Every structure is written in structure tokens, then in C-alpha cells.
């Protein structure tokens, strides 16, 4: 039997990402778990940010942001960025993360992130506690150390990505099957 709870956001796990925003003269980092893919053609994703957050106005001013995937190696920085404000701290300096000049946007990406997704804001929806920024993906930056030299395959699973679930950060688990494995025909012997 399931216990009934009040309406809430219990869709877990979520990616724990660090969003970079701003430009070379003023940039900031914000940890976001309310994020995801919404369209493949054109490629689009979203982030939801509280209007009271320091990064919110920076994103509105520049109308762009970069989503940086996070790993076990930068989990402590991911959490720290989420509990400290850019109004009070230089998050780049405090965490030791390395800003890399944006390719198609003015905001930097994070060198230590295995994937950085550069986005231009297409729409903003005020939804209540958060505003949803719909971003058109302009560029994806993939760390070459995860590209298999022999096959050319991007092996993101080797990056030790983390997820956020109900107040905690977790390493992603073991591989259980590729997309379509449930209907794949078994080879005849």
C-alpha cells in the first residue's frame, strides 16, 4: 500500500548540475537540480531558478547560460556552490573550479565538467517559486578524455556522474542495459 502525501516534487533522481552564467567581467555558478531535456530538434533544455537567487538576474541580463554536468570529483564543489551565494563569494575562487571561455556564449564553462552545454534563453516562464528558463542548445563541449580513441565513442559513464535524490547526492549505479534491451532479439545459436 502507498501512503498519500501532499503534492510535491518527488521525481527523483535528478541530475545535479552547475550552471555558469555571466561573462568574463562578471560570472557566477549556481547548483541546479531542476533541469532536463525538453526537445531534440531543435535541441533544448531547461533550468528552473528562484528569482531571489543571485544568478537569476545575471541569466535574465545575458539571456544565456551553460549547464555543466557534475562528477564525484567535484561533488563537494557542487554542494558548496548550492549553499553559498555569489553575492557574498567568488565561487570560482572558493571552489578552485576552472573557468573556460565560452565558445558560442559569453559565459564560461567549467573545465572539470565532462560535458558543458551552452544555451541561449528562448523563453522564461514564471511558475511560482521558480522561473523556468528554456534554453536552445548552441554547443556541447565534451571532455576528450572520455572519448575512446579506438571507437570514437563518448564514454560518459566513465566520468562518475552524480545525481541528486531527496536531499542527497549519489554516484550513478551500474549499467543494466542499453536503450531497447527489453525488446532486443536474442541471437540464435
Image (tube, helix red, strand yellow):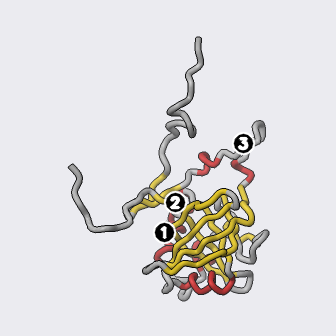
Q: Position of residue 52 (x, y in %)?
A: 49, 86
Q: Is residue 15 left or right of residue 138?
A: left
The label on residue 15 is 2
Q: Tag 2: Cα neighbours inside 10 Å, few (<14), some, or many (≥20)?
A: many
Instruction: Give the SS element for disc 1.
Output: helix
Q: Which residue is mark 3?
A: 153
Which one is in front, 184 or 22? 184
Q: Position of residue 121 (x, y in %)?
A: 66, 75
Which one is in front, 62 or 146? 62
Is residue 74 shown to the viewer in this render?
Answer: yes
Q: Earlier in the sequence, mark 3 or mark 1?
A: 1
The correct choice, above or below, for 152 with respect to 101 in the image is above
Q: Position of residue 17 (x, y in %)?
A: 56, 65
Q: In the image, what residue occupies the spot 73% across and 60% down?
A: 141
The label on residue 35 is none
Single out the mark in the foreground, 3 or 1: 3
The correct choice, above or below, for 85 with respect to 48 in the image is below
The label on residue 79 is 1
Q: In the image, what residue occupies the spot 75% across and 37% down?
A: 151
Image quarter for residue 180? top right
Q: In the image, what residue occupies the spot 58% across and 82% down?
A: 55
Q: Position of residue 101 (x, y in %)?
A: 76, 72
Q: CA distance from mark 3 to mark 1?
A: 30 Å
Q: Tag 3: Cα neighbours inside 10 Å, few (<14), some, or many (≥20)?
A: few
Instruction: Give the SS element for disc 2.
Output: strand
Q: CA distance from mark 2 to mark 3?
A: 22 Å
Q: Quadrant of the C terminus?
A: top right
Instruction: Give the SS element for disc 3.
Output: loop
Q: In the image, what residue occupies the spot 38% across and 66% down?
A: 9
Which one is in front, 161 or 103? 103
Amino acid at each position: 500500500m502507498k501512503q498519500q502525501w501532499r503534492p510535491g516534487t518527488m521525481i527523483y533522481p535528478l541530475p545535479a548540475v552547475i550552471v555558469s552564467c555571466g561573462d568574463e567581467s562578471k560570472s557566477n555558478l549556481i547548483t541546479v537540480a531542476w533541469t532536463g531535456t525538453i526537445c531534440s530538434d531543435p535541441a533544448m533544455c531547461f533550468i528552473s531558478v528562484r528569482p531571489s537567487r543571485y544568478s537569476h538576474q545575471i541569466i535574465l541580463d545575458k539571456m544565456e547560460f551553460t549547464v555543466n554536468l557534475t562528477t564525484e570529483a567535484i561533488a563537494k564543489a557542487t554542494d558548496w556552490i548550492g549553499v553559498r551565494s555569489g553575492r557574498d563569494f567568488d565561487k570560482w575562487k572558493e571552489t578552485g573550479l576552472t573557468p573556460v571561455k565560452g565558445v558560442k556564449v559569453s559565459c564560461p564553462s567549467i573545465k572539470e565538467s565532462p560535458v558543458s552545454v551552452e544555451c541561449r534563453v528562448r523563453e522564461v516562464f514564471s511558475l511560482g517559486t521558480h522561473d523556468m528558463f528554456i534554453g536552445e542548445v548552441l554547443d556541447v563541449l565534451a571532455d576528450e578524455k572520455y572519448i575512446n580513441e579506438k571507437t570514437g565513442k563518448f564514454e560518459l559513464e566513465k566520468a562518475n556522474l552524480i545525481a541528486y535524490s531527496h536531499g542527497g547526492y549519489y554516484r550513478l549505479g551500474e549499467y543494466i542495459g542499453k536503450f531497447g534491451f527489453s525488446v532486443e532479439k536474442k541471437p540464435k545459436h
